[in-house]
Image (cartoon, rainbow, N blue to C red):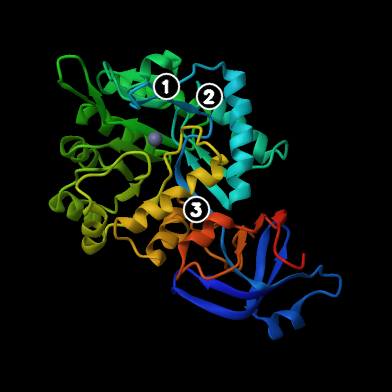
């Protein structure tokens, strides 16, 4: 039995004052005005008094790399370069365990891991969390990224285990790569449509036939496809292939945004680590009505911050790019849950959904920065942390 000062209804975009929540097992069984909920609580219910807090659904990171940790190096002139230290599979898994706990403690209760997980360490991490060995968010994992033969993205590709990106050429090979990931246990498929440029400056796009083959096979078994696509050609390939989300989409056109809306393709906004230009794309996307899900794309070690704290820095960047606080909150909860195909279980505080609840002091609709200091975290009705005054 939780007594809440107020609960954020992310769908309605308003607060419900003096509310109560009853959990049963891992789920929310009832939520409503405190007087009513109190009278429904079983006599042995344990009361958690959060009457000074604002509660909201646990946050969702739609683009995480929990098994990756890049380092930023600076030369004497102050130029920075990022490299990824090549790590063994076992080291990757342990790194993932640490980052998963840090994400959860920061208030991120669900996440999609979209590559850079070694070969299949994301599977081990997901299963360890689900099995109760570790604490971490609910995860959907992609296993290996699938990219075109010759891809040079990311720029530190030479520092990676060459096996952690599956390079394909032709629809048959693309289908084979999909089936390998499916057999390994993938929950979501990640394709890289623009795989960078080689020394000759020519782009290494995935062919639309290859992307479509993967999407067709994935959709047949109910898996979604997330496409890394930065430039307009890549975005068009992703749209034509029928992917479910386009990650980044830095230079998407209005015409492409309209197609994304018509086809229900989400834009996963990951604007923290890459300076975005032009800066108005999120405002244009909102105007068109494209659903925007929030993703951190956090894959580097951020000095002085846990992985979870670093991941949440993206929220402030999205605000600077013109999203309202409420749109960012929705993109991190209800819209993100829809992208994951998990609307039936997370993203809102409603009966029948997992009791994934976070608490803050203050008003996140007015001041998004309170999410940098999440004080109460519950996942599946299990208390992860509570540093609210009086507890
Ligand atoms: Zn990424």
Q: Earlier in the sequence, mark 2 or mark 1?
A: 1
Mark 1, Cα crowd under 10 Å, few <14 / some 14-19 / many 20+, is: some
Horizontally, is 13 left or right of 389 in the view? left
On residue 364, the disc is: none
Q: What label sits on residue 342 in the rendered view? A: 3
- Residue at 66% x, 73% y: name it: 52
From the top left corner, tell me how far across and down residue 157 is, in percent.
37, 19
Tell me the crowding category of disc 2: few under 14, some 14 to 19, or many 20 or more residues within 10 angstroms, Cα based: many
Q: Earlier in the sequence, mark 3 or mark 1?
A: 1
Q: Nearer the viewer, residue 285 or 208?
A: 285
Q: Is residue 219 left or right of residue 366?
A: left
Please tell me whether mark 2 sits on a helix, a strand or a loop. loop
Quadrant housing residue 239? top left
Name the mark on residue 83: 1
Q: Identify the residue at horizontal 46%, vertical 33% (top origin).
A: 299
Q: Earlier in the sequence, mark 3 or mark 2?
A: 2
Spot occupied by residue 122 in the image (x, y as percentages of width and height) = 55, 30
Q: Which structural element holds mark 1?
A: strand
């Amino acid at each position: 039995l939780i007594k809440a000062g107020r609960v954020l209804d992310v769908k309605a975009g308003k607060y419900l004052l003096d509310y109560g929540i009853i959990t049963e097992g891992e789920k929310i069984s009832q939520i409503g005005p405190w007087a009513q909920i109190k009278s429904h609580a079983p006599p042995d219910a344990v009361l958690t008094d959060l009457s000074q807090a604002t509660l909201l659904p646990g946050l969702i990171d739609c683009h995480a790399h929990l098994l990756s940790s890049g380092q930023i190096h600076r030369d004497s002139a102050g130029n920075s370069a990022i490299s990824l230290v090549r790590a063994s599979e076992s080291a990757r898994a342990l790194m993932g365990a640490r980052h998963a706990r840090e994400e959860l403690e920061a208030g991120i209760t669900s996440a999609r891991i979209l590559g850079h997980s070694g070969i299949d360490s994301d599977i081990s991490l997901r299963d360890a969390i689900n099995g109760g060995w570790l604490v971490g968010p609910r995860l959907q994992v992609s296993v290996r990224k699938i990219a075109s033969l010759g891809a040079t993205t990311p720029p530190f590709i030479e520092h990676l285990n060459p096996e952690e990106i599956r390079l394909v050429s032709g629809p048959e090979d693309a289908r084979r790569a999909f089936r390998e990931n499916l057999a390994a246990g993938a929950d979501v498929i990640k394709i890289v449509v623009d795989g960078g440029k080689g020394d000759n400056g020519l782009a290494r796009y995935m062919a639309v036939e290859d992307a479509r083959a993967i999407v067709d096979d994935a959709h047949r078994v109910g898996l979604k496809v997330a496409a890394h696509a930065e430039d307009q050609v890549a975005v068009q390939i992703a749209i034509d292939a029928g992917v479910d989300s386009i990650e980044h989409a830095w230079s998407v056109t209005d015409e492409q945004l309209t197609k994304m809306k018509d086809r229900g393709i989400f834009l996963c906004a990951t604007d923290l680590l890459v300076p975005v230009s032009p800066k108005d794309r999120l405002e244009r996307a909102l105007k068109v009505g494209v659903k925007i899900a929030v993703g951190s794309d956090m894959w580097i070690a951020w000095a002085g911050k846990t992985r979870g704290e670093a991941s949440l820095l993206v929220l402030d960047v999205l605000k600077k790019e013109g999203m309202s606080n409420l749109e960012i909150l929705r993109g991190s909860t209800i819209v993100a849950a829809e992208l994951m195909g998990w609307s039936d279980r997370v993203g809102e505080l409603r009966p029948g959904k997992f009791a994934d609840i976070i608490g803050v002091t203050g008003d996140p609709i007015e001041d998004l920065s309170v999410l940098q200091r999440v004080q109460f975290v519950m996942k599946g009705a299990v208390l992860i942390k509570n540093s609210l005054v009086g507890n």
